[in-house]
Image: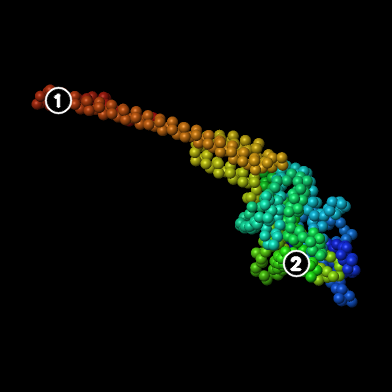
Amino acid sequence: MALEAVTVVVRCRPMNVREKALRCKAVVSIESTRGLCFLQNPAAASEPPKQFTFDGAYCQEHSTEQIYNEIVYPLVEGVTEGYNGTIFAYGQTGSGKSFTMQGVVEPSAQKGIIPRAFEHIFESVQCAENAKFLVRASYLEIYNEDVRDLLGADTKQKLELKELPEKGVYVKGLSLHTVHSVVQCEQLMETGCSNRAVGYTLMNKDSSRSHAIFTVNMEICTVDERGLDHLRAAKLNLVDLAGSERQSKTGAMGERLKEAIKINLSLSALGNVISALVDGKCKHVPYRDSKLTRLLQDSLGGNTKTLMVACLSPADNNYDESLSTLRYANRAKNIKNKPCINEDPKDTLLREYQEEIKKLKAILAEQMGVDNLAELLHAETAHLAVKLPHLLKPQVDLEAEKQLIREEYEERLAQLKANYEAEHASRARLEEDISSLRTHYDLQLSALEENLRKEAARFAMCLGSTYHPIFIPEHISFSFDAITL
């Protein structure tokens, strides 16, 4: 399995109103052609700026559309082929992470990475030949180290993280919503964003107070030239991290301060995981130190193509935070993942249907003869050949279809059991009649044999004292064989 480094790009936003009011100077410069980012220390203007090299470097002149086409497009394309993918933005609060991930409607060139990924996925679905897709979405947030479903009935309910060897880390009880179009994805995104925890700080009036992860799950069924089905599964994690904060700058107090502490702790845990993965001598990676790192466990050092967008403020009063972000991102680009196509997955809905069919076949095999079973399986195979392809069609409610299949099988199985029981009862009556008939003939034969013995004895007595045995020719014989059916 080939190793693949985490892709890291840096994006520097323009000065905002607050920074201009403070008369801040720009200390970040970008050389896009070579992917270079320079950071000048305002306290040491005579010294050369610190230089960092990334897979891409973008400044205020570059749009999100350009970033997507050059960097993000290959990753999302890989997801449509069966790879897992993760895209997340990192940086201090107010550095442009949400702008990069969600973007704005106008101008269209600044539409965010997340809505562009939606468009990309459904364009691939529409253009695919000899393939069927099932697309589902979930949206969660990690607020004060509690996982909450932003699309659930109760968005304040705390959910638990679980882990299984074949499934990895997952959120128990997280709702999955089948989506058929870009519009439906955007509606889920808007619903989740309205339920997300945000708050006012001095650096950002709508500061994200939680980490949010929007996940697109895809199940892909392709047909080869021999007519055989091949299953693949993939997921795309679109992560909008909360920004790191300094209380002296944000003015956070009370609940805002508590949120900031939790945010910084989880981001610190993420930094420790990155450092441990880069350090070849470290045998333990502290994924369990936070809910964020556990959920991103497969994205950092696992079976996932991963992209980090490091967002920066150009202002000199944010020099320390910008330097921290650049060092953070510079370590992350040394992480090696092991992405591979998830072929023949065990957790797809289609796989669940097939497993149910196998169980039903086993039950029928125990209750029926081989000939009857072969005839039934042939009929059911023809039935499923028509029914199963429709399970992946967007307009069908998958859960209702699954329930319908289960009810059909249960009804058919009940009918087969009833037929078998009726046949079994009929056979029991037949065996009872045979047994009664055999007993009747045995009694008759016994009575005949007894009568012959009595007649022989009486005849002997009539002859007197001289005994003359009865001569029976050899060609005459009696047979008392039992009658069998």
Identify residue for label 1.
Answer: 460
**Splitting the image into 4 quarters, where does residue 324 fall?**
bottom right
Reply above or below: 459 against 314: above
Q: Amino acid at mark 2?
A: Met
Horizontal side of 104 relative to 288 (left or right) equals right
Residue that appears at 50% across and 34% down: 418
The 10 Å Cα crowd at callout 2, few under 14, some 14 to 19, many 20 or more, is: few
Q: Position of residue 457 (x, y in %)?
A: 16, 26
Identify the element where label 1 is drawn: helix
Quadrant showing the N terminus = bottom right
Reply above or below: 66 against 272: above
Reply above or below: 453 against 381: above
Q: Which mark is nearer the camera, 1 or 2?
A: 2
Residue that appears at 82% across and 57% down: 99
Report if residue 450 is visible in the image. yes
Q: Are marks 1 and 2 in contact (CB under 8 Å)?
A: no
Q: Position of residue 70 (x, y in %)?
A: 83, 56
Q: Position of residue 21 (x, y in %)?
A: 89, 66
Horizontal side of 169 relative to 117 (left or right) equals left
Report if residue 31 is visible in the image. no
Identify residue for label 2.
Answer: 253
